[in-house]
Image (cartoon, helix red, strand yellow):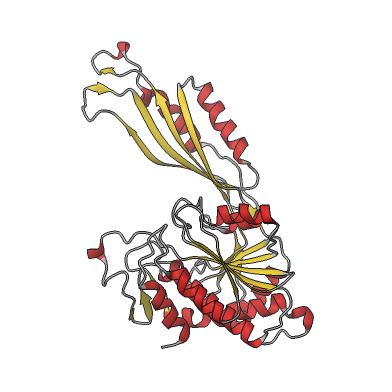
Amino acid sequence: MSDVLELCCELLRRPSITPQDAGCQALIAERLRNSGFSIRELPFGEVENLWATHGSGGPVLCFLGHTDVVPTGPREAWSQDPFEPTIRDGRLYARGAADMKASVAAMVLALEQFVAAHPDHPGTIALLLTSDEEGDAIDGVRAVAAHFRATGQRIDACLVGEPSAAVQLGDTVRIGRRGSLSARLTVNGVQGHVAYPQLADNPVHRALPVLAQLAGKRWDEGDADFPPTSFQISNIAAGTGANNVIPGALEVHFNFRYSPRWSADALREAVEQMLRDADVDFTLDWHLSGEPFFTADGPLRAAVRAAVLEHTGQLPEENTAGGTSDGRFIAPLGAQVVELGPLNASIHKVDEYVPVDELQRLPALYLDIACRMLLADSGRNGV
């Protein structure tokens, strides 16, 4: 069994359902400490965060990952115990295999190999891990980034190990993400008997026209780097359970995935104005998960492109598709952020898996990027 496969399996056996880490970071910290890394634990609330660094000064290259995983869902639906990694037909199955313990294991191997080959490398190479990416994302990298901002810790470039590949390793990298803004809308009415609607005020009837307007609105056209802004209703509930009662309130959950053409404040104002214009009695509770970010072409994107071409024979598609990642908290620190990881086809699903060959190629790919970022100016860009 290869070193990266063995480490990945060790991590997968730990049931680190968010926000639990289940000992993953302690295992990694011990390995990196033995390789000469300085280790700092940065717990916030119930969340464990790890900051491991080697070297000093700039540039600061950070590898970013998470050790928490989503719940398994019905265990009986799995082909095996979701926390007992199993290899079948060239795939490693377990919860978190693709999202994202394969990348974490590969990053650790790459960092160990980098400092072993280049103990006196220029700049700083670092690993940042959290156990709060799949959960609320409040006390994880969001809190760490605030701490870094307060203490002056710089990050110049950040490689996020989120599974980015659509068909095979290296075919896609993320160079930014849309913003994510969620809300819980409550539309207030007056409960009553369905036979006497004149004595009630049906919040469903009041809300439906403006909800249709929100859903049908073309918020923007996107641009060369970002797809159009999207509004989606995710939950809707009203009523007492009886078919002869007009409900007194309607609750709707919705989300915007938005391009840089909008800000969170502008979206809030636009939605609230539409509700006021519709004469709806409402309250809104907003939650901003992250503003959009974009990494312009520069050293990190160039290093990732060159490394992917070297190791896969193809240039990656560079886009901003998909959901959010913890990169949204690092980008505002002034860092270039690129996401590169294995196949994402099975993430969050029953029988999640990572192709074994992709897992085994990841450390060399990450190592190559580290060398290109930190050693290029010194003429020592080989491994």
Specify the quadrant of the image occupied by residue 352.
bottom left
Task: Using the image as rendered, state which of residue 114 and residue 41 is in the foreground.
Answer: 41
- Determine if residue 225 is in view: no
Q: Is residue 155 above or below residue 90?
A: above
Q: Image point 62% across, 36% down: which residue?
A: 266
Specify the quadrant of the image occupied by residue 64.
bottom right
Specify the quadrant that holds the C terminus.
bottom right
Q: Is residue 208 above or below residue 218?
A: above
Image coordinates of residue 177 in percent, x first then y, are 58, 55
Image coordinates of residue 114 in percent, x first then y, are 62, 82
Q: Image point 47% across, 69% down: which residue?
A: 25
Specify the quadrant that holds the N terminus.
bottom left
Task: Using the image as rendered, state which of residue 174 and residue 9 is in the foreground.
Answer: 9
Q: Is residue 211 above or below residue 235?
A: above
Q: Image point 34% across, 21% down: which residue?
A: 202
Image coordinates of residue 53 in percent, x first then y, are 62, 71
Q: Image point 63% across, 42% down: which residue?
A: 262
- Determine if residue 207 is in view: yes
Left or right, 220 with respect to 121, comes to: left
Image coordinates of residue 151 in percent, x first then y, are 68, 56
Numbered circles on residues, count = 0
Task: Using the image as rendered, state which of residue 255 and residue 42 is in the foreground.
Answer: 42
